[in-house]
Amino acid sequence: MSLQDELAKLRRALAERAALGDQLDAKREMEHFVSFRSLREMNEAAVHFERAGWQIDLTEGQDANSRFLLRVYREQAIDVESAEHALRNVHAITEKHGGTYDGFGAMFIDAADSEPKGFFGRLFGNQ
């Protein structure tokens, strides 16, 4: 997927989170998943990510598609500007080292006075 497609996907996800009450300006771990064809590419990218201020988790061996996986993460707010800046940074480093961007994730942070939602909210009698 192109950077523009990933940015559009990110914006949709953030809009959905905001509509559900996620406090996008609250800091939390935002993670990105990337993969590489070779161990050398992954290791070179890992060094580049660390120099750029990211933390990384390397996987041992290859996945079912013969790719080497890397989780890149840091503590940050996920407002649109911050999240887009992070995505652009991760995408650029990944592309420079011949990798593929595979998506992102972050915990949902409710407002302090909000009620639990979904299954657990029903379980505890809040919905």
Image (spheres, grey):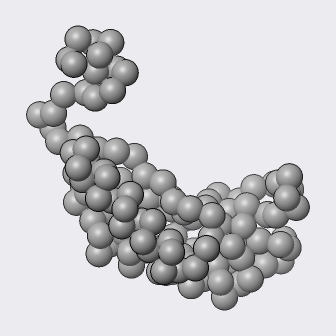
The x and y percentages for residue 51 are 55, 81
What is the x, y in percent for residue 114? Answer: 15, 33
Counting every numbered tag in the picture gives: 0
Placement of the N terminus among the 4 image quadrants: bottom right
Towards the viewer: 63 or 12: 12
- What residue is rendered at 82% in x and 54% in y? 63
Q: Quadrant of residue 78?
A: bottom left
- As drawn, which residue projects farthest toward the bottom? 96
Instruction: Left or right? Give the position of 3 relative to 1.
Output: left
Task: Work out whether residue 47 can be spotted.
Answer: no
Quarter that holds the C terminus:
top left
In the displayed structure, 126 sits above or below 79; it is above
Judge left or right: residue 1 versus residue 63.
left
Q: Position of residue 117 (x, y in %)?
A: 28, 29
Residue at the image point whose x is 38% and y is 75% from the top? 84
Residue shown at the point (77%, 71%) measured from the top left: 36
Residue 12 horizontal/vertical position (percent): 37, 62
* In the image, farthest residue toward the left: 113
Q: Nearer the viewer, residue 53 or 4?
A: 4
**Image vertical order of residue 46 relative to residue 31, above or below:** below
| Camera sees residue 101 | yes
Question: Looking at the image, is 111 positioned above or below residue 37?
Answer: above
The residue drawn where x is 51% and y is 75% is 5
Q: Quadrant of residue 49?
A: bottom right
The part of the image, by quadrant, that contains residue 21 is top left
Direction from residue 123 to residue 46 in the image, left or right = right
Horizontal side of 89 relative to 108 (left or right) equals: right
